[in-house]
Image: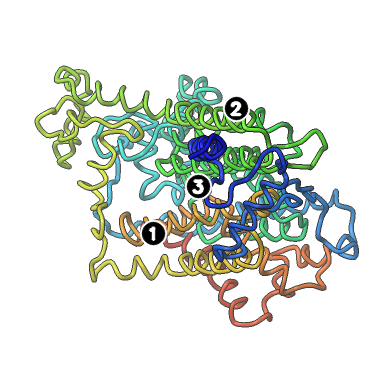
Amino acid sequence: MNGLDRSVSREEKERRDSGGFADENLIDHDEVDRHSVNEVLSQRTTSKSLPKWIELPSSEQQIVRVNALTIDKPSFFDLPQEDIYYFLSSQLVFSRIFVFFIQLLFGGRDYSTDAFKGVPTASDQLGYLDVFLQRLVAGFNKWDAIHFMQITKYGYIFETSLAFFPVFPYSVRLISYCWATSFIYAGLVHPTTAHMLSATMLNFVSFFVTGHVLFRICRALTRSCKCAVISVILFAFNPASIFFSASYSESLFALFTFSGILLLVDDQLGPFSLRLFLSLPLFMLGYGTRSNGLLNLGYVAFYCGREFLWRPTEIKGQRQFILSLPRPTIIRSACLFISRLVMSLLLVICVVYYHSARERRHFCTNSTLDTIPPVLKNFAVTHDLVMPGQVDKITWCRVSSFFFPPFYSAIQSRYWAVSLFGYWQIKKLPCFLLAAPAVWIVAFGVLNQFRRISKGNIWRILAEGGDLIPFTLHAVFLCCGSLLIYNAEVFTRILFSSSPFAYIVLAKWMSEVTPQVRLSDTMEPSVLPFVSHFFWRGGKAVFIYFYFTAYFVCGTSFHAMFLPFT
């Protein structure tokens, strides 16, 4: 082998070690510039017959101008856009009033159930005002709401309570302390009454704000004001409406989750680093509100990945593909991407990690039992409940866990039969039927998203914001968990409180089948708007209308009567 051959072999080896494109056809850097290398990459990728939707961008496709213009027709805006805020606000408020009166009508009837009813308050401790106020919101305090109210009043005093995360009950306690302390000391209201009213107020405000946040999210993702308006109408009357008003954590969780998502998806709110920094505390509180809040890290990873693959340029709205940049820039970007993911993980889990460590010490220390009031001990003995300090009855004290509390899976499995295929029983078939419409919506959205991606290019879609890709993956994960692991009947409220996916999927489809609808048409009639323009659009339209209406009305009344709508 002569000197030239040895030189070529050495050059080929160096290119292999550096991740270059060395094969039988060497690329001479003296003759081919960076853009030509990218063209060679594109040609070789094409030669392997990759589907068009996953082909890497060619050299002329590696700088993308992101279009932020609305897709609505000019004729759609036949009213001032300022009217949108007042219309949406009225719908959000009206739906909560509607839910309130339904639960008021049915909330006084409790059907027999073996569900946890909580430590009763002695009747001689309640005044006439307490009885009246508690009756007003009785329908909002059934099923899991009783657990939340017990935690608000006593803290984590029973092992079953550990299945419920702390941010919601402690927020209710804080609100009660702020407005009701003087009334409690004056003997005007009982603490239980104050907690029930505080939970109702907190959920009303959270629901109202979440509706407007959803409008911003949908407008940013679809670039359509029409879709955004329809999505909020759907949210106002969603099938899980009772859980957004009852003393459940859904409204607060949706507020934290949707607000964090808005910061990630809306490029108009500022540079990505700032938006990411502001979103992480919201996702942290969301995880501290509900266990499935941990999945919100998927949104963080997705949008950090998008920022890594398509870096913003100095020109506003323009992005450049990472592989078209010099190698040092790629390495710095990769390090920034990894550091963002690590920082996000540590920050999001810190509240739950602290809660987990605190309750482990509380429950797994023998002396804790001596500090519990006798009335709670007697209740626990009567109902066979495990209390802090009863270490011989606790199975998870020696279990270690980093991302999830060590007690969570053990308690879910012990008291709620949560395990792989644990819910696959004939007697549970009605629960799966209850979740079936929500599963259909997920399947419908997944199919539409797959069609959109297969017709385009996933790299281009990422450059433009990612469309509904992360929301689709999130919904599929929740759906699979519902069908295979946890209680199927809760999937409806989990889907509609955890992600804007269902609202946006339905809003986009409803917008497509009503092309002539104008802004004023979406606001008519004032009660249940848009129905007259949508109801007669075929079988799917009728199905969606009856699904939302039946679950809104019947679900609220069943839940208020302690019937199995949980």
Residue picked out by circle 1: 480
Few, some or many residues within 10 Å of mark 2 (<14, 14–19, 20+): few
Q: Amino acid at mark 3?
A: Leu
Mark 1, secondary structure of its residue: helix
Q: CA distance from mark 2 to mark 3?
A: 59 Å
Residue picked out by circle 2: 332
Q: Is residue 425 above or below residue 470?
A: below
Q: Which residue appears farthest toward the front when viewing the image?
A: 2
Q: Earlier in the sequence, mark 2 or mark 1?
A: 2
Q: Which residue appears farthest toward the left when viewing the image?
A: 392
Q: Nearer the viewer, residue 300 or 290?
A: 300
Residue 208's x, y, as percent?
64, 45
Q: Which residue: 52% across, 66% down?
A: 441
Q: Quadrant of the C terminus?
A: bottom left
Residue 351's x, y, as percent?
43, 26
Q: Earlier in the sequence, mark 3 or mark 1?
A: 3
Eye-nearest disc, 2 or 3: 2
Residue picked out by circle 3: 136
Q: Amino acid at mark 2?
A: Arg
Q: Earlier in the sequence, mark 2 or mark 3?
A: 3
Mark 2, secondary structure of its residue: helix
Q: Which residue: 42% across, 55% down?
A: 108
Q: Which residue: 37% across, 46% down?
A: 144
Few, some or many residues within 10 Å of mark 3 (<14, 14–19, 20+): some
